[in-house]
Image (cartoon, grey):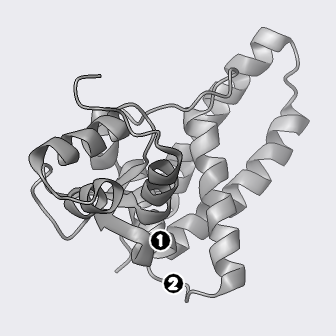
Amino acid sequence: MALFNHQLAEQITALVLQRYRSLGQALGATTLAEEAAAETAFQHNLNLLIEVANGRHMRSEIMLRRIELALEQLLDLLLGNALQSKAVFPEDFWQSEIGILVSRTRWWISAEDLITISNAAALAFGQNNQANRMRISRAIDNGLLDWVPDPSVANPQQNRRVLRSQVERLRDLSRLPELGD
């Protein structure tokens, strides 16, 4: 049984079209033909994400890249802004159908690269202790690290996973915030 269906694609498309229309109206540049063309490409990518979240695709290098691009497009359309600044997910995002779709898709893409907050603290600072876990949490809160909930862990205090590559990059750049920032 599929977890997600075509109705979710229609709901997400409606949200994006609503944003598109409001931006178009503000710029005076909205036409029905433009909307139809944008919807077609977006709808295709959205259906691809739903298929992945429902377990219908095997991992391959080509498919990984397609899904990464489709996920980036979805998140940019949902969270993007004119200033090109990084937006943080609202707290209740991960409990919504869209959030669950994003989470399952991110796990499909990055399962081997996702690590716990404790592992991130040890990797970034050489030791897993409360102060270092707080530093990692602060980096997440400040938008320096992306996180994804682990669907196998029910406790929301323990289900955050971060990308190992981002922790390594921040460690190497010494950009993690200090305790007390």
Q: Secondary structure at mark 1?
A: helix
Q: Residue at x 55, y 54 (%)?
A: 9
Q: Nearer the viewer, residue 127 or 4?
A: 127
In the rendered image, the quadrant that contains the C terminus is top left
Residue position marked by numbered label 1 in the rendering: 110
| Near-viewer residue (145 or 102) | 145
Q: Which mark is residue 95?
A: none
Residue 178 is situated, as x and y percent measured from the top left of the image, at 30, 32
Q: Residue at x 43, y 46 (%)?
A: 145
Q: Nearer the viewer, residue 13 or 170?
A: 170
Above or below residue 175? Residue 101 is: below
x, y (%) of residue 16? 62, 36
Q: Amino acid at mark 1?
A: Ser
Relative height, residue 13 to residue 90 (above, below): below
Please give the residue where the numbered disc 2 appears in the rendered image: 56
Q: Residues within 10 Å of mark 2 (few under 14, many from 20)?
A: few
Three-letter amino acid code at the position of disc 2: Arg
